[in-house]
Structure formats: C-alpha cells, structure tokens
Image (cartoon, helix red, strand yellow):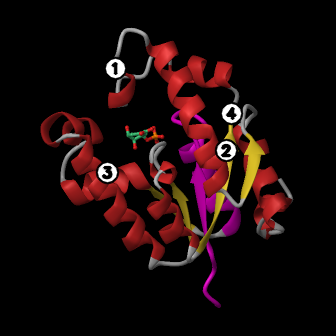
Amino acid sequence: MTERRNIILCGFMGCGKSTVGALLAGMTGRKFVDMDSYIEEQAGKTVSAIFSEDGEERFRALEREACRALAEQSGLVIASGGGTLVRRENAETLRKTGVIVLLDAPLGALKKRLAHDTTRPLLQKPNRDAVIEELLTQRLPLYRAAADLAVPAGRAPKTVAREVLRRLGEAPQEAESSR
Ligand code: S3P
C-alpha cells in the first residue's frame, strides 16, 4: 500500500478530537494515536502529573517531541491536544506529512462537556466557564490558521467523522459505508 497522509484533528479541549479520531481511524483503516496518551506513555506519568510536578513548559516540550516523532509516521489519525496546534512550530511539523482538520465546537457545547472534568490541568480553577471562554477566544484564530479545513463539531461524533471524510475527499472503507 502507498504511504497515506496522516489526519490530524485539532481544536479546543472537549471538541471531540479523541472520539471522532477513533471513529475516523476505524472508517479509514488508519491507526489512531491520542497525543496526550502518547506523551503519557513516553513520560511514564499522566498529563496532570507532568503539569504539577514538572510544569507546563516541560509538557509543551514533550508535546513538541511527540509532534516530531508522529510526523515521521504515515497512515495515522492523530488527536492532538488542545494546545498543540496553537504553537506554529507544531503545525508546521505535522503538516509535512498530514492534513490538519479543526473540529469547531460551539462555546456552549464545550462548557457543557467540560463542566465536570477533573483531568485537564488548565481547567482546575473555580471560574472554569470564564477560563474556557477566554482561552477559546485566544486560540480559535490560531487553530483556524493552523488548519487546512474546519468542520462544525457540535454534533454526534459519527456525523462529524463522516463530514471530515467527505471534506477530505476520502470514502469510508466498505464495511463502514454500508452501515
Ligand atoms: C491542553 C489540552 C489537553 C492536554 C493538556 C493541555 C490545552 O488535551 O493536552 O491538558 O492546552 O488545551 P485535550 O484537548 O485532549 O483535552
């Protein structure tokens, strides 16, 4: 089989990158990689522990390394972290071997999905809704600049995954298209 471009999902925490990514991997026969899980394996500790014990800068360095390593592979669906594609260097690295797709979920849906989250260090603050709103305002233009295309994501994950494939001009594999 010829080398297949990676599909990199980008977007805010809670936009559905991991769920949609796993579906897309199944639909296209690509391998799914969740970048946060990849970093956790490399570091031997959770993202929360990296933030609290080593600091955010260390996490960002690990994230940069993960982008470099994953960009050397092909045939992947990569769910990036919410801060990954905010950094231009990471976008440039990943774009070399893949297409970057923004999952654009509305603010209300993000607030709802993230309301009870206990795993994301940036959200463990009392004024969570305000943090989400401020971060999203800062980041959305950066996501848009990094992405090759954007897909509305406040919908069922399967609908979003199908729309991503359609926009990429790829057909789902046999078993999937008949479902
Ligand atoms: C982060 C998002 C998280 C994770 C880390 C930092 C961010 O990933 O990488 O907590 O800066 O937005 P998800 O978007 O998968 O939650």
Circle 4 packing at 10 Å, graded few (<14), some (14-19), many (20+), is some
Q: CA distance from mark 2 to mark 1?
A: 23 Å
User: Residue 7: image x %, image y %?
Assistant: 62, 64
C-alpha separation, residue under disc 3 versus residue under disc 1 = 18 Å
Percent x, y for residue 85?
Answer: 51, 53
In this rendering, which labeled residue sits more in front, label 2 or label 3? 3
The local crowd at label 2, few if under 14, some if 14 to 19, many if 20 or more residues have their Cα within 10 Å, is many
Q: Examine the rendered structure and indicate whether residue 92 appears above or below residue 22.
A: below
Residue 99, given in percent of the width and then of the height, sits at: 65, 67
Quick one: which residue is furthest to the bottom in this view?
2
Front tag of 4 and 3:
3
Label 1, label 4: how far apart the Cα atoms are: 21 Å
On residue 152, the disc is none
Mark 1 element type: loop
Determine the CA span between mark 4 and mark 3. 24 Å
Q: Which mark is residue 60?
A: 3
Secondary structure at badge 4 equals: loop
The quadrant where residue 116 appears? top left
Q: Amino acid at mark 4?
A: Ala
Q: Which residues are magenta?
A: 1-28
Determine contact: label 4, label 2, CB under 8 Å. Answer: yes
Mark found first going from the N terminus, 1 or 4: 4
- Towards the viewer: 131 or 117: 131
| Amino acid bearing label 1 | Gln
Circle 3 SS class = helix
Which residue does the image show at 56% across and 21% down from the upper left?
133
